[in-house]
Image (cartoon, helix red, strand yellow):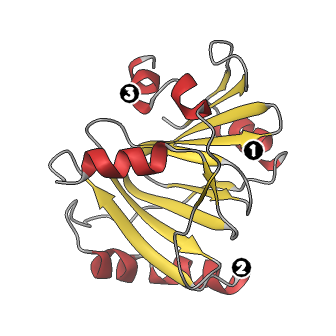
Amino acid sequence: MSLLAIYPDNNPLQGERYSGYDAICQQLAAIGVQFERWATVDGLAADADPTTVLAAYAEPVTLLSGQYGFQSVDVISLNPAHPNKVELRQKFLAEHTHDDFEVRFFVAGSALFYLHVGAKVYTVLCEQGDLISVPAHTPHWFDMGENPYFVAIRLFTTAEGWVAQMTGSTIAHSFPSYDETVASL
């Protein structure tokens, strides 16, 4: 189940939750974030390599690339046995920004995006079939949990792909983790 929680950035205990697709879309659109649900490809193996994943979603990726001018597309895939899962989790847990607009489409699994906009933090639990955008220069972080399982297509408007500018803020440590969020459902 996709979920949006909106917190004051100084009070991670007072979140307002939304689980309905239309309500999530409406709340996120108000801050310039696109949220969609796409049909997923049946029969795609959980351990499919990036080339196979991109081939399975070639049509919608091509449409999005044309619409937004994406120059870089890749696939990130993590599972509980990934040898670098701890390091990758720590890397993405730090609040950062990008100079470019990015989009993630969840082919499988789930993870939690945190968007720090103004005086609020928007946490978005994304699952298989969810597409989310992060506007350029929006402070955010990402939690895949201690035992991650997700496959996501990432699209960027720069040829370099994922390039982050760390904000130096420790705000990410104050908000419920992916594991805490999922446990509360």
Q: Is residue 98 above or below residue 58?
A: above
Q: Amino acid at mark 2?
A: Tyr
Q: Tell me where residue 21 appears, x and y as whole percent.
A: 65, 40
* Marked residue nearer the N-terminal end (2 or 1): 1
Relative depth, front residue between 39 and 7: 7
Q: CA distance from mark 2 to mark 1?
A: 18 Å
Disc 2 packing (10 Å; few <14; some 14–19; many ≥20)? few
Q: Amino acid at mark 1?
A: Leu
Relative depth, front residue between 75 and 116: 116
Q: Tell me where residue 38 appears, x and y as whole percent.
A: 54, 60
* Marked residue nearer the N-terminal end (3 or 2): 2
* Marked residue nearer the N-terminal end (3 or 1): 1
Q: Nearer the viewer, mark 3 or mark 1?
A: 3
Q: Tell me where residue 36 appears, x and y as whole percent.
A: 63, 55
- C-beta proximity under 8 Å, tags 3 and 1: no
Disc 1 packing (10 Å; few <14; some 14–19; many ≥20)? many
Q: Which residue is mark 3?
A: 179
Q: Which residue is mark 2?
A: 68
Q: Amino acid at mark 3?
A: Asp
Mark 1, secondary structure of its residue: helix
Q: Which residue is mark 1?
A: 28
Q: Is residue 166 above or below residue 22?
A: below
Disc 3 packing (10 Å; few <14; some 14–19; many ≥20)? some
Mark 3, secondary structure of its residue: helix
Residue drawn at x 22%, y 70% as measured from the top left: 48
